[in-house]
Amino acid sequence: MAEGLTHPVVIVTWMDAHAATETWTPLDGIDQDPCIVNSCGFLLTADEGGKPDHITIYQSKTDSDDVDGVLCVPVAMVKTMKVFPKDT
């Protein structure tokens, strides 16, 4: 892991809520495809300040441990999560 990084880098694949129609639509015309999202960031566990029952990732962190670009994905929406080795 690069110097100063304390949290592992992850890619989270998850199912997002999305609008299934753009206008009035017959019931048999509703989009049935899932909205799959891939998000990458630094993993923050609930013990470290992440949201319980969610995968919490952040984009950036300062030397004073302020974080930015925080995303909390409910665990039930997560399809996969890849954790990168610390030496990459």
Image (cartoon, rainbow, N blue to C red):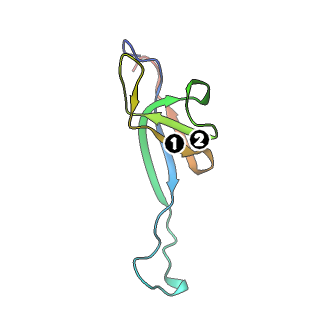
Residue 64 figure quarter: top left
Q: Quadrant of the C terminus?
A: top left
Question: Residue 33 location in percent, x, y?
Answer: 49, 67
Q: Quadrant of the N terminus?
A: top left
Residue 81's label in the rendered image is: none
User: Disc 2 or 1, which lies upstream in sequence?
Assistant: 2
Please name whichever residue, 42 or 49, is drawn nearer the observer in this view of the structure. Answer: 49
Residue under label 1, please give it.
72
Please name whichever residue, 75 or 48, is drawn nearer the observer in this view of the structure. Answer: 48
Question: Residue 35 location in percent, x, y?
Answer: 47, 60
Residue under label 2, please give it.
54
Question: Residue 67 location in percent, x, y?
Answer: 40, 29
Residue plotted at (52% across, 54% down): 15
Label 1 is placed on what type of residue?
Cys
Q: Is residue 26 above or below residue 74?
A: below
Label 2 is placed on what type of residue?
His
Q: Secondary structure at mark 1?
A: strand
Residue lying furthest bottom in this view?
26
